[in-house]
């Protein structure tokens, strides 16, 4: 078996249903990977050891997924020059916002390439790791190209099926306009189109024009009060 090129870390076994999406993508691109649980909070020495030896062991990329106060990816990034991809996991009562900020908001000099929350983030971590490896691996680069084309074809296929479904649901439309009886025309009330958003100036009440006082009117003829 070839040496793993990607290391997938997660803070807890509870992260596995999300993080296995990353593994599935790497498998699709034919990239060997390893997977383990390590926590910067609960097993800090294991995280240090893993990060410090990763490059020597032949890893090219590390993917680190964690939920809650997710410090795992940042701590890994502090101990290696390998690219670190962070996956924030949406397992907390804050629905992952805490993990997203903790993973993304790294101080300058210690980057963590942060993916989106949850399963799509883990999937993207797998694709992104493959893209990093593809820079120096033509085989992986070609597989990525095929992956993109397949994704496009898949969307087009779904679009075609949707159009077909729509024509089944509304057969009258599909049969052509000649068979559809035209609805009786109802005279629309004369209405002025209202803008959806009123501009502040439009909200202002129209200013009343002051009438010019005619010369000789009471106001102009009254002299100062003595
Ligand atoms: P448990 O389900 O084990 O209680 O863990 C894990 O990633 C998990 O999502 C709850 C959550 O705690 C996270 N965890 C971290 C770290 N270690 C564990 N964020 C860490 O080192 O950052």
Image (spheres, rainbow, N blue to C red):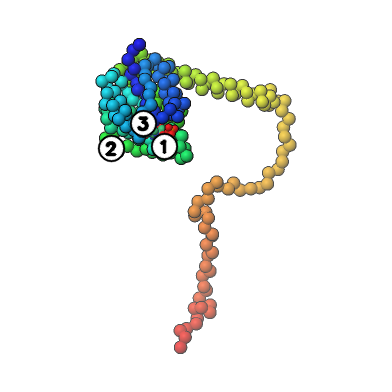
Which residue position holds label 1? 68
- The quadrant holding residue 76 is top left
Measuring from the top left, give residue 168's x and y in whole percent.
66, 23
Front disc: 1 or 2? 1
Task: Please report the residue visible at 36 percent of the width from the left and 33 percent of the height from the top.
Answer: 42
Discs 2/3, front? 3
Circles 2, 3 touching at the beta carbon (< 8 Å):
no
The number of numbered badges drawn on the structure is 3
Q: Mark 2, residues whose alpha carbon is within 10 Å: few (<14), some, or many (≥20)?
A: few
Q: CA distance from mark 1 to mark 3?
A: 12 Å
Q: Name, please, the residue furthest toward the top.
A: 1
Question: Compared with residue 1, is residue 127 higher up or lower down, i.e. above or below?
Answer: below
Mark 3 vs ligand 1: CB below 8 Å: yes
Quarter placement of the N terminus: top left
Mark 3 residue element: loop
At 32% across and 29% down in the image, what residue appears? 47
Whether tag 1 and tag 2 are in contact, CB under 8 A, the answer is: no
Q: Residue at x 43, y 17 (%)?
A: 28
Q: Residue at x 48, y 21 (%)?
A: 152
| Label 1 secondary element | loop
* The CB of the residue at mark 1 lies under 8 Å from ligand 1: yes
Is 203 located above or below residue 183 in the figure?
below
Q: Which x, y percent locates residue 14?
A: 45, 29
Q: Which residue is mark 2?
A: 108
Disc 1 to disc 2, C-alpha distance = 22 Å
Would you call the spot at circle 1 few (<14 residues within 10 Å), some (14-19), or many (20 or more)?
A: many
Q: Secondary structure at mark 2?
A: loop
Residue under pointer 3: 39
Could you tell whether 187 is left or right of 146 in the image?
A: right
- Which mark is first along the chain, 3 or 2? 3
Q: Nearer the viewer, residue 148 or 35?
A: 35
Please state the horizontal and vertical placement of residue 48, each as a whole percent of the image: 29, 29
């Amino acid at each position: 078996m070839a040496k793993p090129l990607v290391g997938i870390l997660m803070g807890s076994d509870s992260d596995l249903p999300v993080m296995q999406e990353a593994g599935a993508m790497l498998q699709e691109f034919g990239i060997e990977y390893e997977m383990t649980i390590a926590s910067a909070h609960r097993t800090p020495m294991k995280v240090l050891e893993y990060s410090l030896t990763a490059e020597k062991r032949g890893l090219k990329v590390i993917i680190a997924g964690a939920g809650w106060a997710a410090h795992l990816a940042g701590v890994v990034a502090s101990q290696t020059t390998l690219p670190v991809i962070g996956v924030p996991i949406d397992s907390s009562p804050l629905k992952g916002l805490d993990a997203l900020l903790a993973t993304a908001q790294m101080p300058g000099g210690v980057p963590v390439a942060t993916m989106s929350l949850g399963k799509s983030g883990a999937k993207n971590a797998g694709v992104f790791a493959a893209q990093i490896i593809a820079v120096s691996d033509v085989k992986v680069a070609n597989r990525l190209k095929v992956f993109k084309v397949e994704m496009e074809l898949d969307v087009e296929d779904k679009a075609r099926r949707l159009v077909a479904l729509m024509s089944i649901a509304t057969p009258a439309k599909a049969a052509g306009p000649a068979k559809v009886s035209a609805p009786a025309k109802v005279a629309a009330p004369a209405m002025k189109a209202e803008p959806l958003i009123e501009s502040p100036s439009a909200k202002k009440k129209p200013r009343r024009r002051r009438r010019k006082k005619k010369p000789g009117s009471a106001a102009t003829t009254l002299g100062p009060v003595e």
